[in-house]
């Protein structure tokens, strides 16, 4: 085990303990969801082919993606045509992986999409065909593409040194010359030098990247469990970069979130113990499907338990925006510059893997959207991070 300063470690443990105590009150959020509107969601698309858990918008193109292990029959990555059809992207060949084929230039299991500051599309391929299964040789990778032409700009291989057995590379965010990714399988942060392609694995196994058994994922009245009956635990999953680029915010799916200075993350010379000691609590959020942060630092996130979209302002105030039964495991949202929040609804908890082998999915899968411009919702009563109303 790595050694850290005992005094600072004790302080961090106390802070995390206080946050964890507050977590159990988050059920009260559902009581306040009446403050959220229920008629502001637009259905942008629907599909019975692809269980999408990712969306990215580039000019007039809507790009969606979903993991292979959900059992979908559609392509892993696709363009939504104006007629609502799925067009394999960038090619049919990229979407035609099957056992025995080289994983280098095929999508094995896509879990995330994102647009970088230069407008390029990044596809995060976990390289794991089955949920909880082993990674394939050359499977884990990042594919950077031109979203308009489909030209592959670069492939970043994630070797076993950064994506070892048991990893599940989850999502990506950008900060100048670096990109950050979370490993939801084993729990770690990956730091990619975009120019050189060198990727480092940091904060591996530290408490801030690990799911806590005392914070279960509860949906539709039940704890989400794996096929063996154990509660589903998802390690480092959501992440965002502060608008000024100084901090990376991250946490396990179940929460809570932490923050770490990017100056230390970006420096390969930072000792592992120093980096671990620099991690501090940031926000005590309950289990969420995904998040997006705007240029002012407001965090939009989808709470799994009460099927509600919330906004966390930079001062820590949390406001429910919309509650809707259709938001059943609304996954990684995408926020456009004009204030449109896109929400792919994956219904992951209803898949056979989490329902004793029987699917409870209600087709079709929906792609929803809503406007989140500042001031759009007036003075909805805010809550604190612990779920207690803080306003009159």
Image (spheres, rainbow, N blue to C red):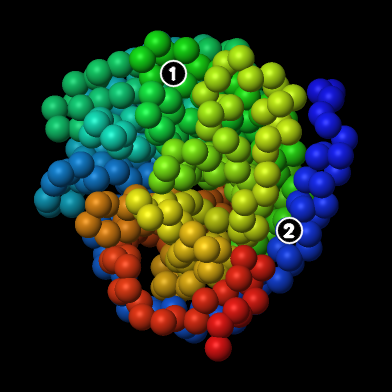
Quarter of the view holding residue 117: top left
- 21 relative to 294, above or below: below
Identify the mark at residue 193; answer none if there is no mark. Answer: 1
Instruction: Please name the residue that numbered disc 2 is placed on.
Output: 19
Q: Are marks 2 and 1 in contact (CB under 8 Å)?
A: no
In which quadrant of the rendered image does the N terminus lie?
Answer: top right
* Front residue of 131 and 37: 37
Can I make out residue 124 in this image?
no
The residue at the point 50 percent across, 81 percent down is: 381
Query: Is 91 positioned to the left or the right of 238 in the image?
Result: left
- 159 relative to 112, above or below: above
Nearer the N terminus, badge 2 or badge 1? 2
Can I make out residue 192 in this image?
yes
Expressed as whole percent of the image width and height from the top left, the position of residue 245 reads 44, 38
The residue at the point 52 percent across, 40 percent down is: 247
Expressed as whole percent of the image width and height from the top left, the position of residue 108 reads 43, 25
Expressed as whole percent of the image width and height from the top left, the position of residue 325 reads 45, 72
């Amino acid at each position: 085990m790595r050694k850290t300063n005992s005094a600072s470690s004790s302080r961090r443990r106390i802070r995390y303990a206080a946050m964890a105590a507050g977590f159990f009150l988050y059920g009260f959020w559902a009581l306040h969801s009446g403050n959220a509107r229920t008629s502001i969601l637009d259905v942008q698309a629907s599909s019975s082919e692809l269980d999408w858990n990712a969306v990215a918008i580039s000019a007039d193109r809507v790009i969606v993606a979903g993991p292979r292990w959900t059992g979908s029959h559609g392509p892993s990555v696709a363009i939504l045509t104006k007629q609502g059809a799925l067009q394999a992207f960038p090619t049919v060949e990229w979407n035609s992986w099957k056992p025995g084929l080289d994983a280098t230039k095929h999508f094995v299991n896509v879990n995330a999409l994102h647009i970088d500051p230069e407008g390029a599309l990044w596809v995060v391929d976990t390289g794991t065909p089955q949920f909880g299964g082993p990674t394939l040789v050359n499977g884990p990778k990042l594919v950077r593409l031109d979203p308009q032409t489909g030209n592959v700009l670069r492939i970043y291989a994630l070797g076993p040194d950064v994506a070892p057995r048991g990893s599940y590379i989850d999502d990506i965010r950008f900060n100048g010359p670096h990109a950050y990714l979370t490993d939801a399988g084993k729990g770690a942060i990956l730091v990619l030098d975009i120019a050189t392609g060198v990727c480092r694995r940091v904060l591996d196994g530290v408490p801030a990247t690990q799911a806590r058994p005392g914070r279960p994922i509860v949906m539709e009245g039940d704890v989400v469990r794996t096929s063996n009956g154990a509660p589903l635990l998802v390690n480092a999953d959501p992440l965002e970069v502060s608008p000024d680029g100084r901090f990376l915010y991250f946490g396990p799916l179940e929460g809570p979130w932490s923050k770490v200075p990017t100056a230390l993350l970006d420096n390969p010379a930072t000792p592992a113990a120093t980096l671990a000691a620099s991690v501090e609590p940031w926000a005590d959020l309950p289990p969420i499907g995904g998040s997006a942060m705007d240029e002012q630092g407001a965090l939009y996130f989808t709470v799994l338990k009460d099927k509600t979209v919330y906004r966390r302002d930079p001062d820590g105030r949390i406001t429910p925006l919309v509650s809707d039964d259709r938001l059943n495991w609304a996954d990684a949202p995408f926020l456009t510059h004009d204030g449109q929040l896109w929400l792919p609804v994956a219904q992951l908890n209803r898949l056979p893997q989490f329902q004793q082998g029987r699917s409870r999915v209600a087709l079709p899968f929906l792609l929803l959207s809503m406007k989140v411009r500042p001031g759009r919702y007036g003075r909805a009563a805010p809550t604190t991070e612990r779920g207690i109303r803080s306003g009159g």
